[in-house]
Image (tube, rainbow, N blue to C red):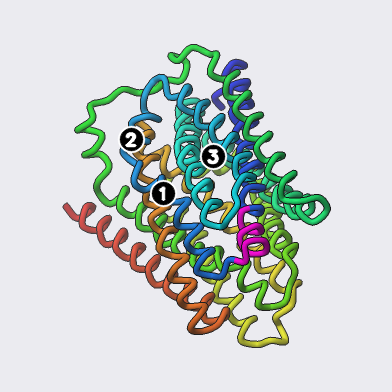
Amino acid sequence: MVQVDAATKNRLRVLLLGDGIVSFGGWIDYIVILTVSVFFWKADQYDVAFIGAATLFPGIVLSKPIGMLVSHPSMIHWLRASLLLRALCTVVLLMATSLQGFIVLAVIRATFNSIALPAISVLSANSVPEHERSRYYSVLNMINSAAKMIGPALGSALSALLSETYTLLFSGFLTFLGFIVFCYLGAQPVSSLRIKKANTTKLQQRLYGTAWYAYVGVMFIYFAMVFMVNNQLPVILSTMKLNKQTLGMLVSASAIGNFLYGFWSVKKSKHKPLTGKISELLMPAMSTMVCFVVISVCFFYFDLLHIETLLLCFLLIGMVSARFSISSNVYLVTNFNEQIGIASGWVQSIQNLAMLGAPFLGAFVLSHTSSGKLFLLSGVVGLCCLLGIRMWVNSSLSIVSSK
């Protein structure tokens, strides 16, 4: 087995630490922004959908310049600047005096955040040896899962015991701490990042074909269906007469599932690492859609609709979504490593585009039908689309092999 030198190990540890801290702060932001919107500003399902869409917009319209920035050899400086400005904007959210002002500040913060995430992805892709990819992204998933598990619960607890003010301040501090970590990482020579230089036209041509379009299709469908229901969770829980801490419990249950699968995947990756095949991505995506159908059944049969049942379902969703996240990272780095910066920018744009329209569709379905039908529609449509992609990929492979 190929050994990793000490310098690379240290760099990977710092990357994991920085990514984990930033993720932890991001999850606290997520829970506080939703909590403030619904329970303080009295936002309805359309307001919640608009907030989610508005914060995604910068990542869509700025995909090309973001891809160029994170592909540049000096992109570590852009990463540090984006984290510092994100921390400042998080604190400035406290100055909002209306829902409209709160949304504007959240969008400005999202603009800087849309640079940080692809930049961290590029740093990871250029630092992780090929034989360590599956293990690295499994460990990263565990760290992000721990952040997802602790962050929302801590955010809800701080909001309930103290106030959203202290929660946002703590979140801003964590982002600033991530900025410090990446400042340390940036002290290393740029040449150590192994950033690949390639002809731009060649790179653009590489981002076509079955491998790319299949990946884009799966990512679009997955995030569209997930956020069709996710952004409506506060409204659904409020309709069920559940308190605002319940949202944190469900998100934490999903995170526990993430963590458990990640822990198992770290051990498994030593003997059977992921290879970057589209089937490794389709399986967890389809499993998530099946979980949505199961949840819809709980809403149709009220005897099954208990907080314990929902917690179990979200635990299972967390486990399969962990596999999806790990497989997605491995697939992207394996198939598009030489143009990871440009690809990461496009992927963020595609994800955000899916997440932009999905909350509005979810709000429309919820306002005209019911929570159960919302989950059912998301699960069934997602399954049909993913099966279609699988059939298209198999057909394309058959055509290629017959030539």
Specify whether residue 32 is painted magenta: no
- Label 2 amino acid? Pro
Q: Answer yes or no: is residue 4 visible.
A: no
User: In the image, 387: left or right of 287?
Assistant: left
Q: Residue 30 placed where, x, y %? A: 61, 51
Highlighted range, magenta: 33-42
Seen from the viewer's position, the closer of residues 21 and 279 is 21
Q: Which residue is drawn at 31% across and 60% down?
A: 394
Q: In which quarter of the image is residue 319?
A: bottom right
Name the mark on residue 65. 2
Q: Residue at x 31, y 48 (%)?
A: 212
Q: In this view, does 316 lie above or below 113?
A: below
- Dot 1 crowding, Cα within 10 Å, few <14, some 14–19, many 20+: some
Name the mark on residue 277. 1
* Sooner in the amino-acid sequence: mark 2 or mark 3: 2
Q: Residue 315 placed where, x, y %? A: 68, 62
User: In the image, 349: left or right of 373?
Assistant: left
* Sooner in the amino-acid sequence: mark 3 or mark 1: 3
Name the mark on residue 134. 3
User: In the image, 229: left or right of 210?
Assistant: right
- Dot 3 crowding, Cα within 10 Å, few <14, some 14–19, many 20+: many
